Image (cartoon, rainbow, N blue to C red):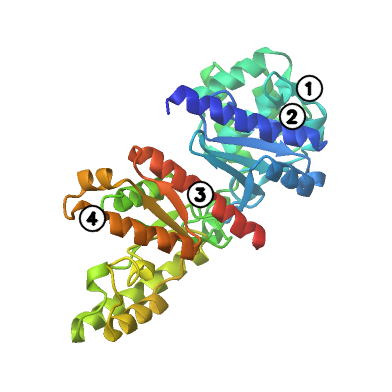
């Protein structure tokens, strides 16, 4: 999909989310981000007294909450569709800035003064000046060109000293606040004043305390999940594109995902002595690895799952030793919450993998179809371009994950 179409699809989902907040009677405004652009994340301030109602409203717009470990005060709501990619609303209910949320200002007066623009509720110009300045100076300790442009535009719109945020800051930095309000942001002196504001408001020890108290690796979204994950078994005949689709899937999903290799092929399920023990040991290790990922809320894509052993490897009833070996492998392997079977026509499979004749491939397809019916699997047409197949698998996985979250 082109960038333009993806942006349009994302904009539509943003409008649905904002519309749901309005329909629920929630006061909100857009702090940062461009709903009409290609950004995947928008920062939104909502009325703190109605957070639970806001969360329920966003859920109706298919935006689902992911807890924000290591980011107190933030709530991440994520929507996903292949047409739009991932969209994240970073929702806050207060205006806290700096390491350890050192500066905390009342949000109510800012919401009282919000202005309705064409695409969103936005802060009044004087409030926008301080909101952007505080985020740049205290949160990032950096005034970027885009910050300077936005701050300059807000400063030119009228007296910024009239903002309730200026009144709240005046008690903390009585000299610097008037100086910032009266200085053109394009003047080099403005950046020196912004650095002085940080030095006055943020103790040097605050950043160290925040880093010491943050869980290792706790970054926005990617390690912020504390909801249960799901395991996906991706199956299909040779040539269906399982390996390629699983690689794309791990990259494309809107939540962290890992691929876990189980190491079993249909013709290597049994064996003798050390070889069999190594395979069983590999399954045990894979089970432990998958369980660790699932506890962290990740999606686990299981490569070469023994669900297919004994049912699709070949015709006829297998011998006792093989049946026992397959049964043990299936018990030791990680449990698949969702089974997805990739299917393609005989001609397509033969063109991609020339290892079998048409009759063998046709019989293999029939056995995978029977497996899909038995396991209640999702069957995906793999004759299409691999990107389209990966999109459908990613969407099916995301929907399964949402159902899992709703069940608790």
Question: Is residue 366 rendered to the left or right of residue 123?
Answer: left
Distance, label 2 to label 4, CA atoms, is 78 Å
Residue 243 screen position, x and y as percent: 30, 53
State left or right for residue 211 relative to residue 320: right
Q: Which quadrant does the N terminus fall into?
A: top left
| Mark found first going from the N terminus, 1 or 4 | 1
Tell me the tag on residue 359: 4
What is the spatial separation of the Cα atoms under label 2 and label 1, in whole angstroms?
A: 7 Å
Rounded to the nearest angstrom, the CA distance separating label 2 from label 3 is 49 Å
* Mark pair 4, 3: CA separation: 31 Å
User: Alpha-carbon distance for marks 1 and 4?
Assistant: 80 Å
Nearer to us: label 2 or label 4: 4
**Judging from the image, what secondary structure is the residue with disc 1 in?**
helix
Q: CA distance from mark 3 to mark 1?
A: 51 Å
Disc nearest the viewer among 1 and 4: 4
Task: Name the front one of labels 3 and 1.
Answer: 3
| 200 to 176, vertically: above or below | below
Judging by the rendered image, the residue that carries numbered circle 1 is 162
Q: Mark 3 or mark 4, which is nearer the start of the sequence?
A: 4
Query: Left of 214 or right of it: where is 250?
Result: left
Helix, strand, or loop for circle 4? Answer: helix
Q: Which one is in front, 374 or 336?
A: 374
Q: Secondary structure at mark 3?
A: helix
Give the secondary structure at mark 2: helix
Q: Are marks 2 and 1 in contact (CB under 8 Å)?
A: yes
Res. 70 visible in picture: no
Around disc 4, counting alpha carbons within 10 Å, would you say few (fewer than 14), some (14 to 19), or many (20 or more)?
few
User: Does residue 147 show up?
Assistant: yes
Residue bearing the label numbered 2: 166
Residue 262, position as x, y percentages in the image: 32, 68
Q: What label does residue 396 carry, if any?
A: 3
């Amino acid at each position: 999909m082109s960038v333009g179409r993806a942006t349009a699809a994302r904009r539509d989902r943003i409008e649905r989310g904002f519309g749901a907040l309005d329909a629920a009677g929630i006061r909100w405004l857009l702090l940062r981000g461009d709903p009409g652009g290609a950004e995947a994340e928008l920062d939104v301030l909502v009325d703190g007294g109605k957070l639970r109602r806001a969360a329920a409203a966003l859920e109706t717009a298919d935006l689902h909450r992911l807890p924000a470990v290591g980011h107190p005060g933030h709530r991440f709501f994520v929507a996903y569709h292949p047409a739009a990619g991932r969209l994240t609303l970073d929702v806050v209910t207060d205006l806290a800035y700096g390491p350890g949320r050192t500066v905390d200002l009342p949000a109510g007066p800012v919401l009282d003064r919000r202005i309705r623009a064409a695409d969103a509720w936005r802060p009044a110009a004087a409030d926008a000046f301080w909101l952007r300045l505080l985020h740049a100076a205290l949160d990032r300790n950096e005034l970027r060109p885009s910050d300077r442009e936005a701050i300059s535009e807000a400063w030119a719109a009228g007296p910024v000293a009239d903002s309730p945020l200026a009144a709240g800051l005046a008690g903390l930095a009585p000299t610097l606040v008037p100086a910032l309000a009266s200085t053109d942001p394009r003047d080099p002196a403005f950046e020196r004043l912004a650095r002085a504001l940080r030095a006055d408001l943020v103790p040097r020890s605050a950043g160290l305390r925040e880093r010491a108290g943050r869980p290792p690796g706790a970054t926005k979204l990617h390690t912020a999940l504390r909801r249960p994950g799901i395991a996906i078994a991706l199956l299909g005949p040779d040539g269906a594109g399982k390996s390629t689709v699983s690689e794309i899937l791990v990259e494309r999903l809107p939540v962290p995902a890992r691929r876990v290799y189980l190491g079993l092929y249909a013709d290597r399920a049994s064996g003798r002595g050390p070889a069999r023990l190594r395979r069983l040991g590999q399954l045990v290790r894979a089970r432990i690895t998958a369980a660790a990922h699932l506890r962290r809320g990740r999606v686990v894509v299981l490569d070469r799952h023994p669900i297919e052993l004994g049912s699709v490897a070949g015709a006829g009833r297998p011998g006792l030793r093989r049946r026992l070996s397959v049964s043990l492998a299936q018990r030791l392997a990680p449990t698949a919450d969702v089974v997805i079977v990739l299917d393609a026509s005989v001609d397509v499979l033969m063109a991609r993998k020339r290892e079998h004749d048409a009759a063998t491939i046709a019989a293999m397809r029939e056995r995978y179809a029977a497996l899909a019916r038995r396991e209640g699997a999702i069957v995906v047409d793999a004759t299409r371009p691999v990107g389209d197949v990966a999109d459908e698998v990613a969407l099916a996985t995301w929907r399964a994950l949402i159902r899992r979250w709703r069940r608790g």
